[in-house]
Image: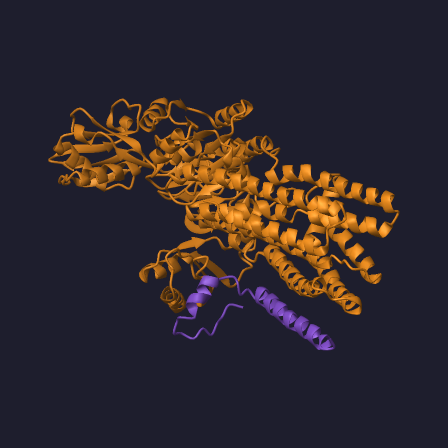
Chain colours: A purple, B orange
Amino acid sequence: MNVLFFLIPISLLLGGVGLVAFLYTVRSNQYDDPEGDANRILSGQYDDKPRS
Amino acid sequence: MTATLRPPVSACPACDAVPAAEALAAGAEAQQDARVALSVPGVHCAACISTVEGALAKHPGVKSARVNLTLKRASVEADPEVAAADLVAVLAKVGYEAHELDAGTLSATQTDKAGRDLLMRLAVAGFASMNVMLLSISVWSGAEAATRDMFHWISAAIALPTIVFAGRPFYVSAWNALKHRRLNMDVPIVLAIVLAVVTSLWETSLSGEHAYFDAALALVFFLLAGRYLDHRTRAVARSAAEELAALEVPRAIRVVDGVEETVQVATLAVGDLVMVRPGGRMPVDGEIVEGRSELDRSLLTGETLPVFAEPGLAVSAGEVNLTGPLLIRATAVGEQTSLHRMADLVAIAESGRSNYTSLADSAAKLYAPGVHILSALSFLGWYLYTFDMRTALNIAAAVLIITCPCALGLAVPAVTTAASGRLFRKGMLIKHSTALERLATVDTVVFDKTGTLTAGTPSLTNLADHDPRDLSIALALAAGSAHPLSRALAEAATKAGIIAADVENIEEVPGFGTQGGWRGQRVRLGRASWIGTQPLAQTSAFLRIGDAAPVAFSFTDSLRDGAKEAVDALINDGIEVMLISGDSTCAVEELATRLGITKWIAEALPEDKAARIAALGDQGKKVLMVGDGLNDTAALAGAHVSISPASALDAARVASDIVLLGGDLSPIADALITARSAIKRIRENFQIATVYNVIAVPLAVAGLATPLIAALAMSLSSITVSLNALRLR
């Protein structure tokens, strides 16, 4: 069962990375305009001024 | 679950917006880079975004433009001299309808801080409960001795900080309730969480078998999910209500030494001269100094007959100027206007309603003491039976966790979210958190007439009574005026195929009518007194050719779309429908007969309306008030539940619980049905949660509940309740 000493920290770390990534997206207003973002990706223009 | 603890936001979205708007107005000069917000309802695709952004960016002075497709808004950063009207024109040129939004009203709650905070806590709780659940599953499937202890300690290390951080909303609200010597749903929740963590830590330190870390975390996660749903529902309604308020940009034209300047209404002072153009709304109370016109007072009094306006007449904020420009000297501004004074009446009416207890609160009142007593009894019983503190505490914790209102916490928000979303798609905005519950119990509906059942636009009734010569002259005269009656007359005549007669020198005499010359005779179309005849009881205009006898054109207010359907559906549903209006008896009677409403009251003052609603309430009737005018606000606030159309005055929208977004009234009957089925689902959810408790609690009291059973009961009941909510039709 010694493998647990690696597996538990690794699984916690990976989960933590997901959590931090989610918190980052919330803090940087990435859910303010979900429909707009879905459509903008279809536009040919390069969006060089994403809203901060 | 949480009605007692919610921040007091939902009652009045525009109230929050008003101070913000005023603050913005005060600091308007300090603002260098103007931020213009436009509502662009037409954008729907990727190409629209680039067209709108491109067109705006090309306009001189614009620094950047960004479209938000979800909200259908464009926000533009531009030099201060760029006016919103220019940008609206730019968008009109590329084919998009745009309306200016008051940036101050919007920015007040643009970033939804409370929602983000809840989401953050929800994410942390979700992360932690997933990990702890994984560890718990290995314990349940047979991890032993040192491995089990290690898993328990790791779980504790994850659970403790998470519970401190994520559970904060519950601690705060439970503390607030206890401080006021009340019990709410959060008190047993907090007690369960704390007891679970403490006994689990104790067990873990003694290498015990059962730890409830996963249960405590799952509890926090499910309850936060319920609370977040609840918050989202109201945030959506609030932002839509805010947009309605922001569409009315509070501007006025001030005249200083003969020079006109456009200013924010909040900056006007008593004694200022204000110019009101035809079609404009009075920004302040005042007295007419110059100009003649007619005033539409229907939003304030419900009267449909326009009032003649001349110098010396007192006007109140909210009245609409119809024909000629008027110069007004302000006698009362802002808080002192009659519009704001109506707020006192509203406050009095509202106090009668505040004693409504929501379903969740009444459930909590029954539930919370029961749970505490049960848990305390099982602790005492087991302690007296075994004299073992550890066993007794473990069982008390198990009872609290199993009875903990996970499903109850989801029972109301899951249903109201589903129901509000459904009604929102039908064009109804549920502003108040308990509005749905109250709507479900309605047995009497009171309608206002002008602007609610009627569209507020007149239509000609006696076209067939006139000979074509009169009609063609009337059409020629009416075409030269923007007065609502003239436009209605012109529209009806054109539709009937009448061709305008050759009338020369047509001129509009503001406040009176239009006149011209036809075959050497003077022809006039306008008010009775100007034409030289007696006025009729209903709204009418008169035509006089030379010295011949005057001819009357009478008008009626055209029905709003869906009014007939809504009233019919309500009557078929067995609901008592009443009509209370400030308009004249004959106009109200005519409309009541047309719609088949048997009970009606005319010439009602605002106080009469409120008193009548209060009287109905005292008789035990649950009254739904539907109204739009200033004269309805007190009645709207005093009724059991209230609806106002989007075209209503801001004050009326603020006072009502539900706002009807489209022009159509027919969703009202559907809304009643949806509300009733929503309440049925909520009750079912309470029953489901109770059934789970009835099965699981004896196990817990008997000391047979393991963390596995607790986790199963909790998840199963929460999922069943959520699925049941989705069945809503």
Front residue of this view, candidates A38 and B700: B700
Task: Report the side of B344 relative to B545 (left or right).
Answer: right
Image quarter for residue B178?
top right
Q: Residue furthest left?
A: B519
Locate residue A40, reporting x and y percent: 43, 68
Task: Report the side of B321 relative to B173 (left or right).
Answer: left
Task: Report the side of B444 relative to B8 (left or right).
Answer: left
Front residue of this view, candidates B266 and B144: B144
Image quarter for residue A5?
bottom right
Front residue of this view, candidates B522 and B169: B169
Looking at the image, residue B305 lies above or below residue A31: above
Residue sitting at x 28%, y 23%? B536
Looking at the image, residue B277 lies above or below residue B225: above
Looking at the image, residue B7 lies above or below residue B588: below
Is residue B292 visible in the rendered image? The answer is no
Query: Which quadrant: the N terminus of chain B?
Result: top right
Count of numbered labels shown in the rendering: 0
